[in-house]
Image (cartoon, rainbow, N blue to C red):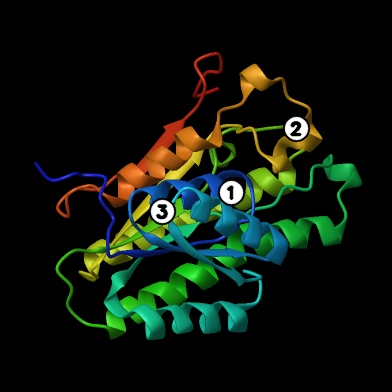
Amino acid sequence: MADVRDMTGRVALVTGAGSGLGRATSLELAECGAHVLVTDIDSEGAKATVALVGERGGSAEGVRLDVTDAAAVDRVVGNAFAAHGAAFDCLVSNAGTDRGADVTDLTDEQWHGVFAVNVHGPMYVTRAFVRHVLAHGDRPAPADIVCIVSISALTVGSGASAYNSSKAAMLKYTEVLQSEARERSWPVRVTALNPAAMNTPMMDQWHLPEEKMMDPAVVAGLVRTAVTLPAEVMVQSLVVTTRNEYFPR
């Protein structure tokens, strides 16, 4: 029986892969046989992830990418398709940021900075990816996009207006992308993954106890599940949280 985890011959690009969930996802996909393009604005973080993949016998390369720079996104995605062709069939839009502050203390820079990474960035990378997928014509199986959104798109948290609002916008954008892929018959399937708090560097500012946070490797496993399902099925939207939390709130 074929290994349903097998990603041999596939190339995946992961944004925000220099730490946290992006790193865990890169390790997971590489372990399943994919060649991973580890992208991050932090070049050293990306290099560290590539080194970890190599230590585990996987294949990866690091690429510096600021997802808020549309021209840079187009260049990196275009170069990936030029180098790998139709084998480049997996995008994990994971890069995100959180600048916590009450509304009265929130600066314009914080608000726009969060939206730039959490909303504009995912649009830039998915737009570039879909354009190239369509330009490469027919393929035997759909290309995969996984948008790492957040349970915060569906819940409310004081002190996190920029993050909650940006993730709600990202979720709606992802849903529209799903609708267009279906109605236009694009060879693309799009998954929205909405995890609760994970034990990653971004969460340090909130000082949550470890028992309230998930291991990002668990969520990375769900990413891998979504992109290795049979071609005729998909995960549309998934919320994952710890058992000591509850949803909806």
Which of the two discs, 2 and 1, labels the residue nearer the N terminus? 2
Q: With 21 as the anchor, is 224 left or right in this view?
A: left
Number of marks present in the image shown: 3
Which of the two discs, 3 and 2, labels the residue nearer the N terminus? 3
Hey, what amino acid is under mark 3?
Ala
User: Relative to 229, does residue 50 appear above or below in the rendering?
Assistant: below
Q: Quadrant of residue 62?
A: bottom right
Q: From the image, tell me which residue sits under label 1.
A: 167
| Residue at 63% in and 52% down | 166
Q: From the image, tell me which residue sits under label 2.
A: 158
User: Relative to 220, does residue 210 appear above or below in the rendering?
Assistant: above
Answer yes or no: is residue 155 visible: yes
Q: Quadrant of the N terminus?
A: top left
Nearest to the observer: residue 172 or residue 97: 97
Image coords of residue 155 (percent x, y)? 58, 33
Q: Quadrant of residue 213?
A: top right
- Mark 3 Cα shell of 10 Å, populated few (<14), some (14-19), many (≥20): many
Marks 3, 1: nearer the viewer: 3
Q: Quadrant of residue 86?
A: bottom left
Nearest to the observer: residue 199 or residue 36: 36
Q: Which mark is residue 30?
A: 3
